[in-house]
Image (spheres, coloured by chain):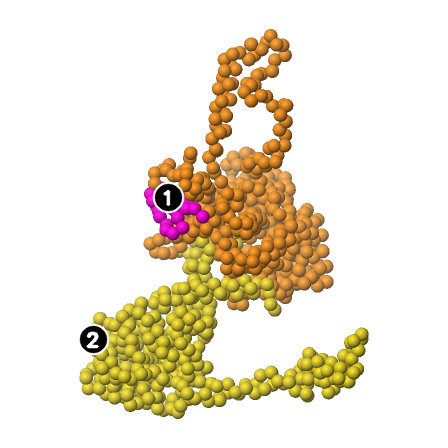
Amino acid sequence: MTQKIDADLARFRHIVRGKVRQNLRRFISQGEIFGKKGKDVVSIPLPQIQLPRFYYGHKQTGGVGQGEGEVGTVLQPGAVEGQGAGQAGSDPGEHVLEAELTIEELAQILGEELSLPRIEPRGKHRLEAEKSRYTGIHRSGPESLRHFKRTYKEALKRQIAAGLYDREHPVVVPIREDKRYRSWKTAWIPECNAAVIYIMDVSGSMGDEQKEIVRIESFWIDTWLQSQYQGLEVRYITHDAAAREVDRETFFHTRESGGTMISSAYTLCADMIASDYGGAEWNIYPFHFSDGDNWSNDDTRLCLDILKNRILPAANQFSYGQVESPYGSGQFIKDLREGLSGQEKLVLSEIRDREAIVQSIRDFLGKGR
Amino acid sequence: MPLPRYLAELSQQIRDHARSFGLDFFEVIFEMLPYDAINMVAAYGGFPTRYPHWRFGMEYQELSRGYAYGLQKIYEMVINNDPCYAYLLEGNSLVDQKLVMAHVYAHCDFFKNNLFFAHTNRKMMDDMANHATRVRRLAARLGTEAVESFIDCCLSLENLIDLHAPHIRRRPEPAEAEADTDDDELPAEDEVPRLPVKRRYLDPFVNPAEFIERQKKKQQREKKDAARPAALRERDVLGFLLERAPLKRWQRDLLSIVREEAYYFAPQGQTKIMNEGWASFWHSTIMTHRMLNDAEVIDFADHHSSTMGVRPGRINPYKLGLELLRYIEDKWNRGRFGKEYEECADLEKKRRWDKHLNRGREKIFEVRRVHNDVTFIDEYLDQEFFEKQRLFAYDHNPQSGDWEISSRDFKVVKQKLLFSLTNFGQPVIEVVDDNHLNRGELLLVHRHQGLDLKLDWAQATMEALYRLWSRPVLVRTISAEKHTLLRYDGKDHTSETVGASDGLGHK
């Protein structure tokens, strides 16, 4: 049912989107947007959407309550709310508004704010799914699908043509031949799938802050790619001296102390592409985050080799993000830059701190590949 | 949607019972609404139509979400209007509907008879709809954005009204002041009024020369005082801006709408505890004495007790109001008041005190007529009631970051409760100068009562004020125990420490 309030609601949602957009950079760098509820809704705390008033902070005024307990008893969190018997609903309170946005809305805002180009899926518009839409008209069908307007028009045409139409007494009665029915047409919808493969160095030199940066950045990358493809598969690989595929939870929370052999991860990634995402219908996005340390120059050479011959040809884009850490040498990005200059599909980005996440997202997603 | 027949019949039964108990109300028109419509009405503050504004949408979303998650459910809405409109939630059980209808009749009695509602607009249904039309028309002409952002500014100042203004005439109505001026009757300009004498020869004795001289001086002094403008002191900041701020006509129109609605809703905020207490008192009386059948007792008790539930961190107005009314009724039934009772030292005797006065009912009807929450609590919440209800005060402990019970002392708790109710627990702010330092700047004073303003909010509010006044705006307050003058000039905020009497704008 449409209601009068729908207009107000739409207006409110518009304002929320505006606020999110205005504060997007802050949300990104502070990682505030993670209140991820369920599957495709995010909730974002938006204190500034309240109307300001002359007001005492509730923390100053305290309040009056009722029940058991001695002086000094701590009230349960959540028990204190608003200001006792204030005007219902008009009390600004300490209540922080949680705005809810769908992932699509968020991706749209991200795209507009960072002016990200839409991704043109690779070459093949394979006709994938068929879908029925009720856009057609047929001369036969069930009465429940009768198209009243068309039927009436047909009857009117017939009567005028036959000279039966009387201007003074415009009675139009459809007969069987006039009847028109709605019917479906089959539409072919192109479907594109994408696979994202995250690779992260979990050796001792990657600290919590570095991982947090990776986590924030991967959230935004997922959000954007999800809005660009119908199906998105995400895989995670961690590596130190050896690489293994892990689930999301483990990916962000393991910590190893061993050394670093990046080639092990690249090998696993290349194998994964070959076995699971072969053929031309996949858009493949490997992302590698590390602090730039590698075990040896030999291993780095091996990495370059795998990238050039196995990964880059298959992928839409290979993205390497180097997170600055006090322990890492930061050498790897230089090696990549020198060893693979001229490779269009290779994107490199240095992430100094949280502030740099926005720029890095733009580096990675700004090519529209 | 009007009530189905069986509910309409019940509503008439309940109405008759309510009348027989002495309740006196406007005609009540019930309508039944599905949950989304009742959420809409609730978001609109009880009305079926309001002017377009995003905050109603926000409110609606919160309510809908609360309903969807099963956290809250609105059983009824009732509007202070003549006739009184009330909305029932479709799909409630019969016993709930009965309870709600009894509750509604008592609310309506309260609206009609409580003193603080005496000056409210009883045709507000129509006026709200008119406001909606006016705002829509302006939005169509000037754009939604412009209209809405101006309304936002007005709403930021919504609490700056004079709660007592509807009941007092602070200034003479201009028309009336002129009406009874009859030139013949007044003494000539400079003539000194003499005391009347019956015989002319007595005049030098009744009105001696020095008396006349004194009178003359007094007259001159008064004239001089009158020529000096009286110090400005205006609680009704919205009204002041409406009269004096350089606003365009459409802006004035919007401001007057916001102000009118603020005054309309104010008494409901002022009497929340009493109003809900009164309605709960009567729904429980009518249900338990007249309307319940045997099968419904458990459901009624379940519903009633959940309405009366208390959570440690907040006052439940239903519970507090109901208990206090019952307490008063009992006191006046048994004559437990007055000098003799107060001074009785024998506790046992006091406990069994009963004068068989039976004046309780009469007393609570009087209470509902003349009190608001502040005077109600102040007058009747005594030590005995306080101990029975286990009230306490809580405060924020900045060290641990927790909320803790800070006092169980009667005086402290009562004072805190009264403070939270006085002026809705919001700061008192007045306009004291509309031409500060002869620069047309607007000076307001926060009447500091021990608590500081939340500064970031205050500054944001000053920006709204600036938009209306279009000259720099100043607020004098006390911040961290220092007299402080906040100023906003349209670009920057400044804040300076001042002396105790500086900048008060006395000319």
Q: Residue at 45% of width from left, 41% of height from top? A: B434
Image spot of residue A18 (x, y percent): 45, 64
Q: Name the chain under label 1.
A: B
Image spot of residue A14 (x, y percent): 49, 65
Q: Quadrant of residue B94?
A: bottom right
Q: Residue at 44% of width from left, 77% of height from top? A: A227
Q: Residues within 10 Å of mark 2 (few under 14, many from 20)?
A: few
Image spot of residue A43 (x, y percent): 44, 68
Q: Residue furthest left?
A: A297
Label 1 sits on what residue type? Leu
Label 2 sits on what residue type? Ser
Indicate whether B486 appears above or below A15: above
Question: Which residues are the magenta region?
Answer: B470-497
Regarding residue B123, the answer to whether it shows in the image is yes
**Badge 1 is on which residue?**
B485
Q: Do callouts 2 and 1 point to residues on the same chain?
A: no
Image quadrant in which the C terminus of chain B is located: top left
The answer to if B8 sits in the magenta stretch is no
Q: Nearer the viewer, residue B115 or B277?
A: B115
**Residue A329 has which mark?**
2
The answer to if B473 sits in the magenta stretch is yes
Indicate whether A24 appears above or below B291: below
Distance from disc 2 to disc 1, alpha carbons, whole Å, reads 54 Å
Q: Nearer the viewer, residue A136 or B246?
A: B246
Identify the secondary structure beneath mark 2.
Answer: loop
Q: Quadrant of residue B330?
A: top right
The chain drawn orange is chain what? B
Q: Residue at 46% of width from left, 35% of height from top? A: B231
Indicate whether B98 appears above or below B337: below
Q: Nearer the viewer, mark 2 or mark 1?
A: 1
The chain drawn yellow is chain what? A
Image quadrant in which the N terminus of chain B is located: bottom right
